[in-house]
Amino acid sequence: MALARTGLLAGYLIAFVASAARAAPPEDFYADVRDDLPAGHVTDGSVDYREHIQRCFDENAQVLFPGSDDPDRPMIYGATGPLETGPMRRIRFGPNAVLKRLPCTGDLLVLGRGTHLTGAVINGNKYAHWPLMKDREVKAYAYTTGAAVMLKGRNLVRDCFVYHNAGIAFGDWGTSDNKIYRCRVEGCGFLEALGDLGYWGSERASADGFYFGSSSRYNIVKDSEAIDCSRWGGVVTESASYTTFVDVRGGNLHFSCYGFIDIEGAGPGNDLVRCRSPNSQINVQQKFQDVMSCTASRFVAEHAAYPRLIGCDTVGGPVRLCAAWKNKFVTAGRQSPMLAGNRIVLGGADPQHSLTVICSDGLGTAAWNHLYGFDDGAQRSTEMLLFGVGHRDGNRQSWGDWAPVLDAHARPRYLRAWLDMAFKEKYDGAGAE
């Protein structure tokens, strides 16, 4: 019995020590970035302190940006980029602390390999950037605007907020094992300056929320949001693989962007799990990608082979696993799609698509899907088209006007970003010139 008690006590001690080791370090563990700012410095975001903040990063492994007790009077640290940390650093922002990007091209905050970033609020200050962005040389999809946060591998980013950045919010080129938890992106890019063109494709509008490219691998974005990003809320491309988006939300408030999440030009094994947008699309265009329990305005996988779409909902639009050219279907579909348990709720009479799957090998599965077709008495949407699908048990079609169902999906909302109407009125359409 005594031995048992001794073993139990030892277990408690080990658990206590382990818990203490995992606890957050005290505030005096961090170097105060203000100690490197010049005498008489201001924290209203009006002065460029890049050199001073960079010196603090160079000389300290742990850096704190102190905040304030008054949310109406935050401590704002102005800087141009790049601000680069060394490897294995710890960067922390206190409550009501803001890093404000002053006009510059290139990346703002570059995290060294293994660096943790916690609580950062980054004001991209995009409207102050417009003359710089508008007048620079425009190249075919160049990323010269720069990311607010650039990841260099094995980074952990938690509880951060990027808004009004002129370019990408969180970017990764060729690095891996990055984790982004509970982060939010709002209002990135300059789409509003392009006017109502009905087309999103301008390099000046390039801005994504979470971007993974250049063969990066094993990244995760979880419990995060991307609102009004001029291009996509999330992107996996350039052979990036094994990236996971879990419980990510997004959508458009003021303008119609490219879409919610895009997996295009990517490698295999990328997963979308419980990702939700009420008014923006999900594109999956490569082999061996999984989309599970997601919601979007539509799903498009016209070039995908072996995709899996399981338990998903559309909000007003179709599911399309085929290609159409000049209003005609291309019958050379992709191999072995798997669709099961999806609900396709149409908000109008699309003349081409509802649930449309064209399979080239006869081995695809489309089972237990429910198409809620649109029919208001005057117009009726097309019936589902399953061509070359080998297994199609349990599919159902219903017809009606599903406006009450569609209206039940809550729209996203802003926390900090806003649309500068005076800017929009001044430059409306000017970006297309």
Image (spheres, rainbow, N blue to C red):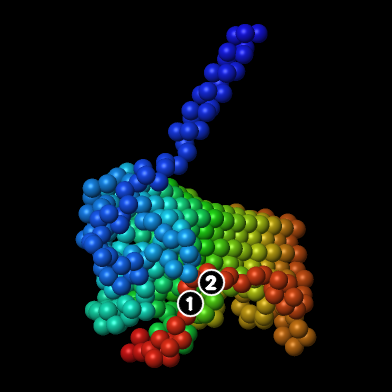
The residue where tag 1 is placed is 418
Using the numbered discs, state the Cα–Cα distance from disc 1 to disc 2 in whole angstroms: 7 Å
**Residue type for callout 1:** Trp
Query: Dot 1, crowdedness within 10 Å: few (<14), some or many (≥20)?
Result: some
- The answer to which quarter of the image holds residue 146 is bottom left
On-image quarter of the N terminus: top right
Between 312 and 427, the one nearer to me in the picture: 427
Residue at point 75%, 58% (across, down): 394
Q: Give the image location of residue 356, x and y in percent.
A: 62, 69
Task: Give the quadrant of residue 78.
Answer: bottom left
Asked if residue 107 lies left or right of residue 290, the reply is: left
**What element does badge 1 sit on?**
loop
Residue where numbered disc 2 is placed: 414
Q: Are marks 1 and 2 in contact (CB under 8 Å)?
A: yes
Above-or-below relation of 433 to 394: below
Residue 200 in view: yes
Residue 162 in the image, given as x and y percentages of width and height:
43, 65
Q: Residues within 10 Å of mark 2 (few under 14, many from 20)?
A: few
Q: Is residue 146 visible?
A: no
Mark identifier at residue 201 = none
- The residue at the point 67 percent across, 77 percent down is 347
For residue 253, above or below residue 359: below
